[in-house]
Amino acid sequence: MATRSALPGSTRRRVRTIVVAGALSVVTAAAMAGTAHAATMSVPCGRTGGGTAGLIAAIAASNGSVGADTIDLAAGCTYVLAAEQSPGNGLPLVTGPLTIQGHGATIQRSSATPFRILEVAPGGDLTIDNTTIAGGSVALSGPTAFGGGILNSGRLAVTNSTISDNAVSGTGSSAGGGGIANNGTATVTNTLLRNNSASATGTHIFAAVGGALINRTGATMTVEGSTVVGNSATSRGSSDLLFIASAGGIGNTGTLTVNGTQIAANRVIVDGTRGQGGGGGLSIGDGTATVTGSQIVGNSVTATGNGASAQGGGLENNGRTKITKTDVKANRATGPTAQGGGIYNGRRLSIVRSHVVANVARGTAGPGQGGGIFSDGGSVVLTATDVFANQPDNCEPVIPGC
């Protein structure tokens, strides 16, 4: 038998209304709590709240929130950085999840003081889309200089963007990653990396590595559908021990994946007694690398000075590398010792369904060695790969299938 409520009907309706309203308030509050810290912040080109000051304020605000924020820049605007906002950086350190939608905007340094454009902290997560990062500069004497445009120690995704005219330089020390230096996880997609540079000078042990990109030990980087062109790594000086310039385009000692990317017209220059230059386009110093469906074309290594060497005009491999469906073409190594106009290999290399063609090793103090591929005690496995029209020869020593 049903028990009737002791409350009159009008009272029951009022109680129900209060309970439902309370429940809706709880649901609404919960929904708001889930999004309260995520925001889209538009930064106009000028006016109050806009320009460079607005961009700096927006990143600072994002760092203070919990959710994944988005900053929308004004289409075609140039945001000029005139001073550091965090140590060594023109923008605040990125510490949380953030997306910068550039809409064709540029963020660039304009100052006599060298500093990089931005840095992603450990635990930070930054996506940059349709944005140009330009003119960053890190110049240090003593410590190693990393990441002229961007230094990443968290998670970084760069899409549909341009990284150009950034530089790292070391005086009496080393420098790496003119465009981007990666210590964490980085993905570069459909992006142009152009005219970035790494340079070093000294008299002891020093190196310049990765004119455009450097992926460091323990880090992971994927470069896909991108163009790495006209970048450089340069070392000048003298040393009784060792000095190096390598990876005019991309340098790696971590885990690197390159897909559908053009690596072209990058340069390595080493000038001085016993200097070593290697990997005009790409240098694998250690770690692993996979290159698929790409082009390594028209890169160069030039060495000058007594006892100097040039190795791997296109690719220098001292790690574990697999190349598939890739053209290694018209690269050049020139120096007193010149080995591997196309490829220098010192460890483990597999080349599958690829072409190594029209590369040159030109010795200035003797004959060049391995116009196409020079293997210096490492292993090279060729599978369905053509090696032809290289100078002065295709492979040295003899490699099966070459």
Image: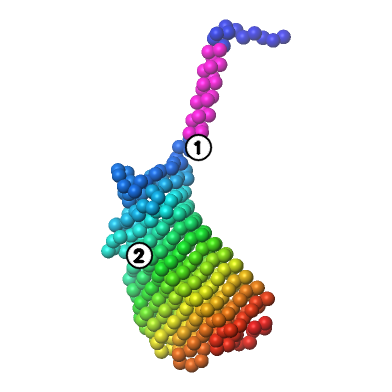
Q: Residue at x 52, y 18 (%)?
A: 18
Q: Is residue 200 magenta?
A: no
Label for residue 137? 2
Few, some or many residues within 10 Å of mark 1 (<14, 14–19, 20+): few
Q: Is residue 337 above or below residue 92?
A: below
Residue 60 visible from this viewpoint: no
Among the 4 quarters of the image, the one containing residue 323: bottom right
Q: Nearer the viewer, residue 278 or 86?
A: 278
Magenta stretch, residue numbers: 13-32
Position of residue 49 in the picture relative to residue 264 (left or right) = left
Q: Is residue 14 magenta?
A: yes
Looking at the rendered image, the quarter that the C terminus falls into is bottom right
Residue 282 location, x and y as percent?
Answer: 51, 72
Among the 4 quarters of the image, the one containing residue 193: bottom left
Q: Residue at x 43, y 62 (%)?
A: 163
Q: Is residue 209 above or below residue 69?
A: below
Q: Amino acid at mark 1?
A: Gly
Q: Amino acid at mark 2?
A: Ser
Label for residue 323? none
| Alpha carbons under labels 2 and 1: distance apart | 39 Å
Residue projecting furthest to the bottom:
366
Q: Is residue 4 above or below residue 80?
A: above
Magenta-colored segment: predominant secondary structure: helix
- The kind of secondary structure element at disc 1 is helix
Dot 1 corresponds to which residue? Answer: 34
Residue projecting furthest to the left:
112
The tag earlier along the polypeptide, 2 or 1, is 1
Residue 369 location, x and y as percent?
Answer: 54, 88
